[in-house]
Amino acid sequence: MIEESPEAFISRWRQYAADVEMFAHTEGSPLLECRVGGAVLQLFERTGPYLSRPGPTSMIVNPTTNQLEPLDAENARPHVESNGLGKMLAIGRVLAIDGKLAVIDAGVPLVVSLDDNGHRKVAEGDMVRVTSDGPIHAFVVTRADSGGIRRTEVLDDSI
């Protein structure tokens, strides 16, 4: 994360939040399991435990890598896959580069943190491979409407 706080990061990158499915949180584990673009990944949630509930959620997925590897666009198919505990391999198109961050469309948007030289060989529009270091950071933006029944009764505060 490059911003000064999780809230500032979310504010800046909210438009690139991915629709993910979160699974039940394992008590005592700092990692969340989520389905991201068809792959089940373990993510380190940066927004606190109260926003992460099982079900559909909008989340900024923020892997870190030391380089974006350019690929031949004809033979590359955008996707995300697990590459070990808290790590991913993704192939996708570079949508934007802003300082030490790049947005990759790998079937789902990824806001990738780069080291100082991680993006020197690529430009917007290029197909790339991202092999992340662990852990992959996650910023819960909103809970998607799960279609559940909402309570509508009026509460009596005098009790």
Image: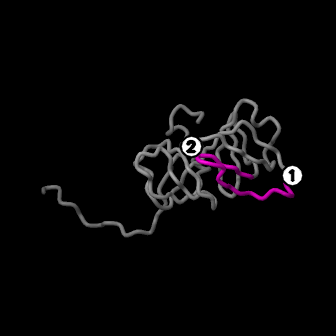
What residue span does the magenta drawing correspond to? Answer: 73-91
- Crowding near the residue tagged with mark 1, few <14, some 14–19, many ≥20 C-alpha atoms within 10 Å: few
Q: Nearer the viewer, residue 107 or 28?
A: 28
Q: Nearer the viewer, residue 39 or 37?
A: 39
Q: Position of residue 25 (x, y in %)?
A: 44, 53
**154 lies left or right of 28:** left
Which comes sooner in the sequence, label 2 or label 1?
1
**25 lies left or right of 9:** left
Q: Is residue 111 above or below residue 150?
A: above
Q: Amino acid at mark 2?
A: His
Q: Position of residue 42 (x, y in %)?
A: 56, 50
- Crowding near the residue tagged with mark 2, few <14, some 14–19, many ≥20 C-alpha atoms within 10 Å: many
Which residue occupies 76% across, 37% down? 119
Q: Position of residue 150 (x, y in %)?
A: 35, 66
**Dot 1 corresponds to which residue?**
72
Q: Is residue 62 above or below residue 145?
A: above
SS under mark 1: loop
**Split into 4 quadrants, where in the image is the N terminus?**
top right
**Split into 4 quadrants, where in the image is the C terminus?**
bottom left
**Dot 2 corresponds to which residue?**
137
